Image: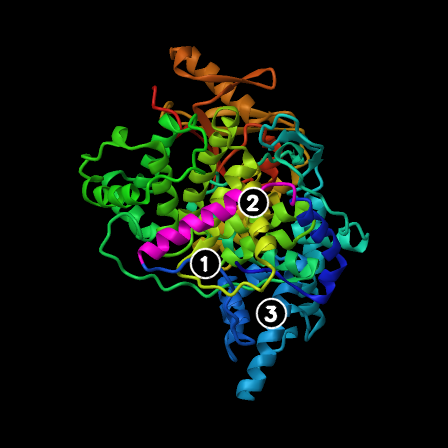
Amino acid sequence: MNQLPQKSPLASLVSEGTNSRVESLDNLSMDNFWLEVENIKQSAEAEQEECSLADVKTQEEGEAEAEWLQDAGLSDLLGDGASENDNIVLLSTLTKTQAAAVQRRLDTYSRSRRRKTKHPVRDVRDIFGVANSEETAAKKEESSPDQIWRNVRTSNVQKSENQDYSCTVRNPGKEEMFNMDVAYSEQAAVLLKGSFLSESRRLKDGNALTRFRIPKGRLGVTRIGDLSAQDMKKIPTLALIELTALCDVLGFELKRNKAAKLKTTEKRLFGVPLNTLLENDQKLLPNTKVPLLLQALLSCLEKRGLETEGILRVSGSQTRIKSLEQKLERDFYTGLFHWDEVHQNDVSGLLKRFIRELPAPLLTAEYLPAFAAVQNIPDLKQRLQALNLLILILPEPNRNTLKALLEFLSKVVARENNNKMNLWNVSTVMAPNLFMHKGLPSKIPEGKEKQLAEGAADVVRMMIHYQDLLWTVSSFLVAQVRKLNESNSKRYQFCDKRIKNLLRKIHADKEKVEKNQAEPCKIVKVHASLLLKDSLEVHLNNATRVADVLRQFQKHLCQNGWNINTVNFLKCNNSMECTNLLLYEVGGNIGEHCLDPDTYLLDLYHINPHAEWIIKQNPSYPYVF
């Protein structure tokens, strides 16, 4: 298992806190971890395969930086005469720490290239800030990292409400705020200046885990799945840059493995890439996001295994599990496989085998070292920040599959009184299955096995316990996506005179809108083509929330003869909220955005005045209209 990020000299400032945190885990048994490792090795030996904790493969200087720049969407910066026009938009959205992270990698790449080729390379100042004239300097000042950070910082200071994102525990520990409005790397830089970083938050047992609340600003909270696929494609790039900047501030070096080359297999289920599995499954059930086999395994365990003592920990028969795998390969898609005849412990063995047999780790070969290295960050909140960014970087199939697995593991922990599997037990059993992979041989430093094993189990514990928080898209990333969309729309050039006249009119209307942003109320139209031919006029004021509009829409339906029972409601914050209707923000500086019920719409209108608002059916509920 990799130690990523690796420590740099600056990291010595916080190493003492890390050691004390790891030592605090000594009282928690690691027996389940080593027992699971032994079971995995026995299974691998029976098939003449090797499986070990993943370790990083070193790369030549400059190679890692070149790959990083490509993955960060900045590949145009690598060439001699390449134009940075395609990168200016992305660079203009970066905070000060993010821009510094890009510059640092470009510096390293440039030095290595000079040594190898002796050819001149582009100067970093061409990207980040040497002006040739006063006019150019003024333009660059508007988009400089310092100015961008000032703008983002001032625009994100909002009054907030609190929403609980911690999992339920019997005796929860202290509660703290988890700020998602300001970039994590900028928060860390402020803490570092104030010398607050050395304080370590220790994890002693499942009941002492800190409870975090996300301050819910007036624009609400955005979860993974709330943004359109088009906008979500921008998130991994931004998250990678921010993760790198965070590691830089903390004094850790972020390295990644090379992408694994997947071997072809004749099997249809086990050992098949996630993308291939989903493509096959979607032929049967369109819009499938989690492999059908995994869904079947989890469903079987939820129905008959949650109450079983030692579920996941107690191994089934390796002979039976291998036989069941062969039967599944043959009969799963025909519907002839009978789950009722399979013992629960054998099903849990099949589940763990499915995860291990994936050609590439579920956490991906590239970022498995980074997940493992989260243990090296001494502060709990910053560990969660890093995990949140890593979750956002994962490919969508991996992220959806991981979420399905973690949701099941939470259900196992919730039945602890019956199955005797608490959070730590589940974490130690599942950690080897997530962090050990036959495709990634390793050389673990002597004497480091215990520390790395505890760290892996600790990471799994955090992913299970804080999964709701980790599957949230930070407000600062959503703001960067909006700015990317706005900047991209301004790049198109039109030569037709009539189009230019139309644009003048649009800009005049926009200026009129901007002048009226301070007005206390506004009338907007909300569309619901599924239910109404005409749009619904809504009067907005500073107190109007999404939930208020949905209630108004429900009353409008009743006045037009709709049965009130056709709209499901949920009591929330002493009020009744629609649960099968959602309000979406569409167009303008966003693709499509499912809005939090507590979003204040006048604030949102000021940020995106050209968007349409559309009421749609909640896909989680059946159609009742």
Q: What element carries label 1?
A: strand
Q: Residues within 10 Å of mark 1 (few under 14, many from 20)?
A: many
Answer whether residue 613 is magenta in the image: no
> Which residue sits furthest right?
194
> In 3D space, how far apart are the residues under numbered discs 3 and 1 (Cα atoms)?
31 Å
Which labelled disc corresponds to residue 305? none
Q: Name the residue under label 3.
A: 105
Q: Residues within 10 Å of mark 3 (few under 14, many from 20)?
A: some
Q: Where is residue 19 in the image (x, y as percent from the top left)?
A: 70, 53
Mark 3 or 1: the one toward you: 1
Residue 24, picture quadrant = top right
Q: Name the residue under label 1.
A: 52
> In 3D space, how far apart are the residues under numbered discs 3 and 2 (Cα atoms)?
39 Å
Q: Is residue 96 visible?
A: no
Mark with earlier residue (3, 1): 1
Q: Mark 2 points at which residue?
A: 30
- Asked if the residue at tag 1 contacts the one at tag 3, i.e. Cβ–Cβ closer than 8 Å, the answer is no
Going by the image, does 162 lie left or right of 199? left
Q: Position of residue 338 (x, y in %)?
A: 23, 32
Q: Position of residue 89 (x, y in %)?
A: 55, 60
* Identity, as a three-letter code, of the amino acid under mark 1: Ser
Q: Is mark 2 on a helix, strand or loop?
A: loop
* Identity, as a three-letter code, of the amino acid under mark 3: Arg
Going by the image, does 20 lie left or right of 508? right
Q: Work out whether 336 lies above or below 505.
A: above
Numbered range of the magenta stretch = 26-47
Mark 3 or 2: the one toward you: 2
Mark 2 or 1: the one toward you: 2
